[in-house]
Image (tube, rainbow, N blue to C red):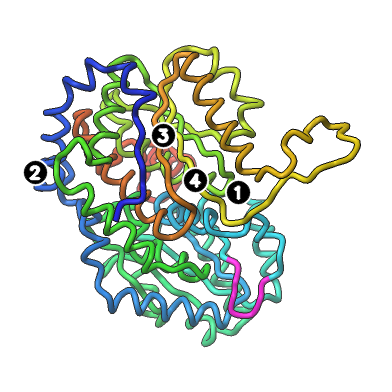
């Protein structure tokens, strides 16, 4: 069952000729992806993850999550890039907006994140928060030697062993890593940690529907079966070429706009809980398409907040942008504007209306203004922010990314440029094996 509604009417006419000309190419790109005949075809394990996820693996993930929830006030998810962004995107979207300000409750630990930066103060302040607390660790790394998560894990492992004792600590650490090799796999075997495998044929930015994303999401108390069901339905919806295939249409249109000179895609949300979903999306598209001197630059904004900062540039700046707007049809809570006798603020005309109705009119007004200002708008509507809709949205963007990358003429599944900064950093730090 598809719940995503893709509306292209406010964008397609900006590049109608290019869009029509790319129909056959979009069909070919979809076939290349589905048949596994393109570059990077050894990283297509994500294509069938939702429909072929073993039920016993899901049940084991839920059991591990239940154990951590029972024994921890905090669970720290250690990873960088795709090893944490998917989980954070889903957890942030489904959480109470002020969840961070509430104390942990029994069987409801807070999920925190580490190893996604090398911020000294961030790491020190995290460790201070965890002093005297019951906490667990989910460490995610294929190799176990990636600098950022390796530093965080070394520090937090040492702290956990001091606070809980070495024997108890091993039951509070879960490693998600390679099946057979690497430093983290060796450590997990020697220390006796519970482990999950990062599939060899799934790249990090496509890994949210593997244990990499599913375990931290389950620890946060969300229904991973519903998430997978939503993704599985979108998998079926995007299987065959059609003008009704939303992933194919999205990939075709964004490439048409790119050919028309629109070099920047801005992902827009009108619900602040989607902020980290935008961060996940930026990695997915930036790392997949930004290569060989090509690629649409992925950016994001939070409206209406950023209409008071970035709004001027979007409205009147260089016409090299288009917007993709994620719209949530129905909020979870009914909340209305009250009447006020003095009406000094002049908003009694809104009295009795849901705040979301005001938000929706801001969304519509923004679409009209930006379209009039020469900014194409693609609109993606989901019914509500829940696991099922997010599962659909995740798979929709993943599938669209694979098709779009092949249409662009790049390998969507490698990331050769990511290693450049690391080599320079290792030389500067005089890491063994690296010369001046």
Q: Residue 5 at x, y = what percent?
A: 36, 42
Residue, disc 4? 328
Quadrant where the C terminus is found in the figure:
top left
Could one spot residue 338 in this view of the protein?
Answer: yes
Residue 37: mark in rendering: 2
Distance from disc 1 to disc 2, alpha carbons, whole Å, reads 42 Å
Label 3 residue SS = strand
Task: Mark 3 or mark 4: name the one nearer the start of the chain.
Answer: 4
Examine the image and state in which quarter residue 348 appears. Answer: top right
Task: Mark 1 or mark 3: name the one nearer the start of the chain.
Answer: 1
Q: Is residue 106 magenta?
A: yes
Distance from disc 2 to disc 4, alpha carbons, whole Å, reads 36 Å
Q: Residue 148 at x, y = what percent?
A: 49, 53
Closest to the camera, between mark 1 and mark 3, is 3
In magenta, the rendered stretch is: 104-110
The front one of 166 and 213 is 213
Residue, disc 1? 119
Label 1 residue SS = loop
Label 4 residue SS = strand
Could one spot residue 148 in this view of the protein?
Answer: no
Residue 379: mark in rendering: 3
Q: Residue 164 at x, y = what percent?
A: 61, 82
Q: Is residue 64 above or below residue 379?
A: below
Label 2 residue SS = loop
């Amino acid at each position: 069952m598809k719940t995503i509604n893709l509306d292209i009417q406010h964008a397609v006419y900006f590049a109608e000729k290019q869009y029509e000309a790319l129909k056959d190419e979009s069909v070919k790109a979809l076939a290349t992806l589905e048949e596994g005949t393109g570059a990077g075809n050894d990283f297509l394990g994500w294509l069938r993850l939702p429909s072929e996820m073993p039920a016993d693996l899901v049940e084991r993930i839920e059991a591990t999550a239940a154990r951590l929830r029972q024994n921890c006030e905090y669970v720290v998810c250690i990873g960088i890039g795709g090893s944490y962004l998917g989980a954070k995107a889903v957890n942030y979207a489904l959480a109470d907006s002020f969840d961070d300000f509430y104390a942990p409750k029994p069987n409801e630990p807070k999920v925190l994140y580490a190893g996604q930066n090398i911020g000294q103060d961030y790491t020190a302040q995290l460790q201070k928060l965890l002093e005297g607390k019951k906490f667990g660790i989910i460490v995610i790394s294929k190799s176990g030697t990636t600098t950022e998560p390796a530093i965080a894990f070394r520090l937090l492992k040492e702290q956990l062993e001091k606070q809980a004792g070495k024997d108890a600590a091993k039951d509070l650490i879960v490693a998600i890593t390679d099946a057979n090799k690497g430093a983290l796999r060796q450590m997990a075997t020697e220390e006796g940690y519970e482990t999950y495998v990062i599939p060899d044929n799934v790249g990090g930015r496509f890994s949210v529907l593997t244990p990499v994303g599913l375990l931290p999401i389950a620890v946060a108390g969300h229904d991973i079966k519903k998430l997978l069901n939503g993704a599985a339905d979108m998998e079926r919806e995007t299987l065959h070429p059609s003008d009704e295939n939303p992933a194919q249409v999205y990939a075709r249109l964004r490439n048409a706009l790119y050919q028309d000179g629109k070099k920047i895609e801005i992902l827009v949300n009108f619900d602040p809980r989607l902020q980290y979903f935008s961060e996940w999306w930026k990695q997915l598209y930036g790392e997949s398409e930004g290569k060989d001197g090509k690629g649409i630059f992925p950016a994001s904004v939070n409206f209406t907040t950023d209409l008071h900062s970035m709004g001027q540039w979007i409205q009147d700046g260089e016409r090299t942008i288009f917007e993709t707007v994620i719209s949530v049809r129905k909020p979870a809570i009914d909340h209305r504007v009250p009447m006020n006798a003095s009406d000094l603020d002049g908003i009694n005309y809104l009295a009795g209306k849901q705040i979301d109705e005001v938000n929706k009119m801001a969304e519509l007004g923004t679409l009209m203004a930006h379209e009039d200002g020469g900014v194409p708008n693609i609109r993606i509507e989901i019914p509500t922010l829940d696991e099922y809709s997010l599962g659909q949205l995740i798979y929709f963007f993943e599938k669209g990314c694979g098709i779009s990358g092949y249409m662009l003429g790049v390998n969507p599944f490698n990331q050769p440029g990511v290693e450049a900064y690391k080599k320079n950093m290792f030389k500067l730090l005089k890491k063994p094996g690296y010369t001046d």
